[in-house]
Amino acid sequence: MANSPPTCDPAAWLTEHGDYLYRYALLQLRDEAAAEDAVQETLLAALGAWARFSGKSSVRTWLTGILKHKILDLFRSRAKEPQFTPASDDPEAELALLEQALFDATGHWAHPPRTWGDPESTLEQQRFWETFIRCLEELAPTHARIFHLREMEGLGTDEICKELEITSTNCWVMLYRARLGLQQCLETRWGGQPA
């Protein structure tokens, strides 16, 4: 007997997966109303696409995939609107200046980061992740988005550039700024604390 897909019960989707989808959308969008809208649009799209659901993945995975597309659509529409003035007209020159400020002539840290104790036990601590999320939320939205796509979703530079319609140089500069901002925030709020 062939496996049949789960039954279509949108009320169960909201009960079982709504909080997860909302947290995911909120982390990406950092706007409660936009996150709620994205989840609602996801559930409506899922209802309309239910007949095509093959059941090869879990309902949560399927819904998350739809949500990712809704979020990407929103980012694409936002990218077409001017949101910020670039710090520099020459991102490569800016990247060179940032490197000069952080590294000496031999390529070593000019001011090495403080030690964080035992990294493995630190990563396991819930407080660290709460601090990390707060630091991520404090980054410029585009920087946080690029960091998330690269480091958490594992997308390559080409994929990120295509999704956000930016050049690879801009991508690397913004990713560099995101990493630097996270480092500084974590050192302020977490670095040096006992593991």
Image (cartoon, helix red, strand yellow):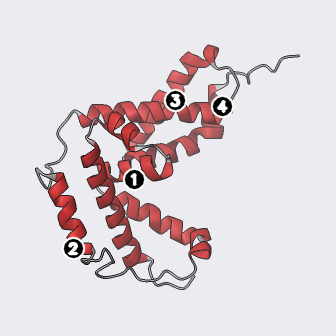
Q: Residue at x 17, y 59 (%)?
A: 94
Q: Which mark is residue 101?
A: 2
Residue 164: give its label.
none
The mark closer to the camera, 1 or 2, is 2
Residue 132 horizontal/vertical position (percent):
46, 65
Q: Secondary structure at mark 1?
A: helix
Q: Earlier in the sequence, mark 4 or mark 2?
A: 4
Q: Quick one: label 1, few (<14), some, or many (20+) residues within 10 Å?
A: many
Query: Seen in the image, is 73 located left or right of residue 96?
Result: right
Indicate which disc residue 59 carries: 4
Please report the residue visible at 49 percent of the width from the left and 80 percent of the height from the top: 116
x then y, percent, for residue 24? 50, 45
Where residue 111 appears, as percent x and y from the top left, is: 31, 82
- Residue situated furthest front in the rendering: 106
Question: What is the three-letter code of the residue carrying label 2?
Answer: Ala
> Residue 140, position in %: x, y?
28, 55
Image quadrant holding the C terminus, namely bottom right
